[in-house]
Amino acid sequence: MRTRLQKLPIGESSFENMRTRDYLYVDKTEYVHRMVTEGAYYFVSRPRRFGKSLLLSTLKCLFQARKELFEGLWIAEHGEWEWEEHPVVVIDFNGINHDTPENLRLSLEEHLMTVAKESQIAFEKSFPAPKFKALIRGLYQKTGVPVAVLIDEYDKPIIGHLGRGTEELEIAKANRDILKGFFGVLKEATVVPALRFVFLTGVSQFSKVSVFSELNNLYDISTSKQYADMLGYTQEELETCFAGRIEQFAEEIGWSQDKVKTQLALQYDGYRFSERDVKVYNPFSILNAFSDRSFGNYWFRTGTLTFLVNLLKQEQYDLPTIEDLQVSHSIFTTFEIDRLNPEALLFQTGYLTIKDVDGRLYTLGYPNREVKTAFTESLLFSWTEDVEEEISSHVLRLSRYLRDEDLEAFFEAMMAIFASIPYDIETKRDESYFHTIFYLMISASGGDAQSSVLTCRGRIDLAVTFSDKIYIIEFKCNQSAEAGIKQIREQGYVEKYKQSGKKMILIGINFSTEKRNLEAWQVDR
């Protein structure tokens, strides 16, 4: 008889609900214990839907001394903790109105007044910062116990206005200035003695010349080796906590459990947040995949990409190079309204992750297939604008054609796609343009495409890898397909892959700027 499975906590961010309503909870309380016993001021940034709100809720219950909720968890079994009740102030910016600076002030004031009323703390009406200060000091004076302040999605009033034009940018700046003064309360000399613990979460960290200039005593654990797997599921957690779900998934789709685990890893694993080589799964996608018993693009569907895509187009970013970016550590703590960095934005929002670390040099790339496939599809359709419906069916088949080595159908589909793109969308139809569209199409179809692959004798324009074969592709513009094959041969590009034991298929492709399409191709097996 199969063991009864606990409910999957899809969309559930309340620790109390998780522990009292039979939801599956992956125990992260060892990290919670480490934070509350080793420090007092923390900040962590993670992509959306990564469990930040649940972590904050867990801390709230801990400081409320809800010991019964922690029975059987690491902190109750192994951690030394005095279950003393502390006043807790929670500010969730998901519920704070920030559409104008005035509404941000009013909404903050109303929230603080509500907390004060519930705690029977009285103070005069004033701006948010003085009210925040009075609330913390009032709670401390009333109880004699220092206060825990927990702030979720602190950056919502800023990033919610980016990429929406000049007027919205001014709102973001004004909101930032309000937040600087508001958070500055937490380091004032008269407030610090009243604080036991401060924890902020967000998607991005605005560097010290901005919001954090007023709160520079925070320990940023976003890229800390100690907390690298505090949010998200590790491989061990997946295989132990979700063993019954893996079995159920495998039975329903007729796969072995090992095959299911391999596909889950390919689709949702790969997020790495520190020098320490530990990767985690996207929790939101994993929960939805087990619920549906399907490998969908769940996390990707929950956010808007318009701002990101527009920024990359505005910067004329070389899109195929996104997969192999090399950056310094400063990229992880740099995010400014006035000078948005595409690499920092892509990393902090979860579209890129750390792939390798070599001293002070970090290599970034897509974390997994879900992100790469869905993101490149969005980029492709942003380039091809109003012809999404015309080309989407062709794009979806490209990877299958290559897998089946049906190259006649593959090139027929490619020519149909290029023919569908209106001429006035992009006038600079050079090799870089064709290369970019080609790369985006194959990636969006689910193919494992790698652009500008470095070898000891040059760079391969495009390599597409399957379990049994590798395509090595060289692009030419207004030349000949034969020239592409010749370059692959002369530069010894196949040498890089000889040890794989896979079949090598060499393709030279020539694009014609006059025809605005593929003109010729040659295949060498």
Image: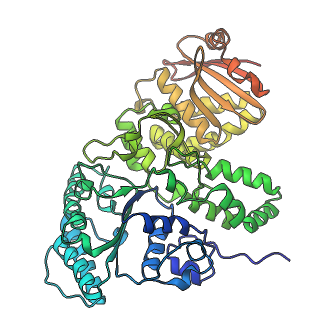
Q: Residue at x 55, y 49 (%)?
A: 271
Answer with the quarter of the image where residue 382 lies: top left
- Name the foreground residue: 253 vs 68: 68
- Residue sitting at the far bottom: 120
- Name the foreground residue: 305 vs 512: 305
In this rendering, would 306 be left or right of 407?
left
In this rendering, would 166 be left or right of 473?
left
| Up/down of 458 relative to 290, above or below | above
Answer with the quarter of the image where residue 179 lies: bottom left
On the rendered image, what quadrant is the N terminus found in?
A: bottom right
On the rendered image, what quadrant is the C terminus found in?
A: top right
Judge whether residue 2 can be spotted in this image: yes
Answer with the quarter of the image where residue 157 lies: bottom left
In this rendering, would 191 be left or right of 271?
left
- Name the foreground residue: 459 vs 279: 279
Spot occupied by residue 458 in the image (x, y as percentages of width and height): 57, 16
